[in-house]
Amino acid sequence: MFNKAVTLFRIFGFEVKVDWSWLILGALIVWSLATGLFPSWYEGLDPAAYWAMGVAGAVGLFLSIVFHELCHSIVARRFGLDMKGITLFLFGGVAEMGDEPPSPRAEFLLAVAGPVSSAVLGAALFGLGFLLRGSGAVTPVRGILNYLAILNLVLAVFNLIPAFPLDGGRLLRAVLWGLKGDLRGATRIASGIGAGLGAGLMFLGAAQFFLGRSVGGLWTLVVGMFVRGAAKSSYRQLLFRRAVEGVPVRKFMVADAVSVGPRASIEELVDDYVYKYHFKMYPVVDGGQLVGCVTLDQVKGVPREDWAARNVGELAQACSRENTVRPDDDVLKALALMNRTGRGRLLVVDGGKLAGVIALKDILGFIALKLDLEEQ
Ligand SMILES: [Zn+2]
C-alpha cells in the first residue's frame, strides 16, 4: 500500500507523502461536503459557493491529519526515534516509525501528542469562528471553520479509542507496559482489544447494512476491517522484530552459494542453473571476485533466439546497496531491504568477495520456529 505514495512536500525535515487512494477519498469528501453537509448546515447559498467550501473543507481535512501526524513525529524525534515521514492513505495518516518507542513514558507522550494537538486545533478553530460571528458577512468562511473545528475534535476522540494501533491503544499499551514491564504482553492485550473492536465494528456495519442504512453500514464495515487488520499486523510485526532483533545476517546466510561465471551464455545459465536450482537470482563471480548478480527477470528481457550468443557478464547488474548486505548487518536490515525491493534473496558481500546468499524463506522459517517454541 505504501509503495504507490507520492511525495507532496517536506516540513521540519519530514516528508509528507500521499497514497493514490487519497485522491479517490478526496474527491468523495469534496462531493459529499458540497452536495450534502454544507447545503444542510447553511441554506440558500450559491452552488458554486458550496463547491468552493467542499474543496476548502477537503484541503483542511488533509492539513488537519498532517498536523496531527506531525505532532506525533516531533515528539518521536525528541525521543531519538528515527521518523522517516508521514504517509496519508485511506482513513488518515501514518507516521512511519523505524522502531518501537524506548520506554513506556516515551510511548505515552508520543501517543498523547496527536489527540491533544487535534483537540487544541479544534478549540482554536471554534474560537476563530466565534470571533468572526460579529463580522456578519462571511458565512462560507465561518462554515468551513466550524466544520474543521468539529472535524479536529472528532479526530481527537476517534484516535483515543483504546484499540491498538490507534493512539488510545498506544496509551493503553504504555500504561500496561509501565505497570508490568513487558512490552510484548502489553502489545498482545492492546492489539487484542483493537482486533475485538474492529470485529465489533464490522458486525455493527453488517447489521446497519441489512437494516437498510447501506452507505453508513458499508463505511462502518470498512473502518472495522481496517482497525482489525492494523491491530493484528502490528502485533505480528512486534513479534517478528523481537525474534530477529540483533541477529546478524551471517547466521542465516548460505556460505557456499551457487554462483555463475560472466562468460557463461544465457542458455547455459538457464539450462545448468535456473532449471537445476530454481533460484531467481544468481551471483556472478569472476576469478574469486564478485562482479554482480543476474536475475530471472533480466533473462526474460532477452529474446530466446539471443540466449546462445549473449553471455551472463553483459546482463549482470552491478552490486549496489539495493541488492547486497554485509555479514555483520542486522537481519532486520536485510528484511527491510527485501521488503522495499521485492527481492527474496540478497548477496552477502565481505570486502568485495561473495560471502554467501541470504534468503527470505530461511529467515521466515527461523522466525516461525522461534515463535512456536516461545509460545510454549
Ligand atoms: Zn494519532
Image (spheres, rainbow, N blue to C red):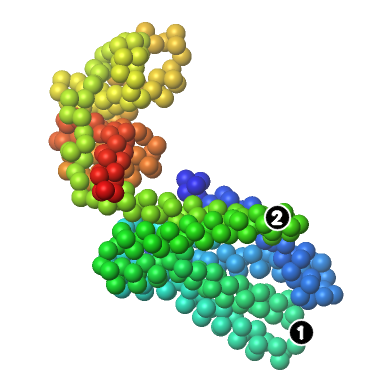
The residue closer to the viewer here, 32 or 190, is: 190
Q: Residue at x 66, y 74 (%)?
A: 147
- Of the numbered discs 2 and 1, the one sitting upstream in the chain is 1
Residue 206, given in percent of the width and then of the height, sits at 65, 54
The residue closer to the viewer here, 288 or 200, is: 200
| Residue 93 appears in the figure | yes
Q: Secondary structure at mark 1?
A: loop
For badge 2, the amino acid type reads: Phe
Q: State the CA–CA distance, disc 2 to disc 1.
A: 42 Å
The residue closer to the viewer here, 351 or 362, is: 362
Q: Residue furthest bottom?
A: 134
Q: Secondary structure at mark 2?
A: helix
| Quarter of the figure with residue 144 | bottom right
Relative horizontal placement of residue 11, taking residue 202 as reference (left or right): left
Q: Residue furthest front?
A: 376
CB atoms at circles 2 and 1 under 8 Å apart?
A: no
Residue 330, given in percent of the width and then of the height, sits at 22, 46
The residue identified by callout 2 is 209
Q: Is residue 294 above or below residue 116?
A: above
Q: Residue at x 27, y 40 (%)?
A: 369
The residue closer to the viewer here, 355 or 316, is: 355
For badge 1, the amino acid type reads: Ala
The residue identified by callout 1 is 137
| Residue 49 appears in the figure | no
Q: Residue at x 40, y 54 (%)?
A: 234
Q: Residue at x 45, y 21 (%)?
A: 301
Q: Is mark 2 within 8 Å of ligand 1?
A: no
Residue 52, given in percent of the width and then of the height, sits at 73, 67
Relative horizontal placement of residue 225, taking residue 34 as reference (left or right): left
Q: Label 1: few (<14), some or many (≥20) within 10 Å? A: few
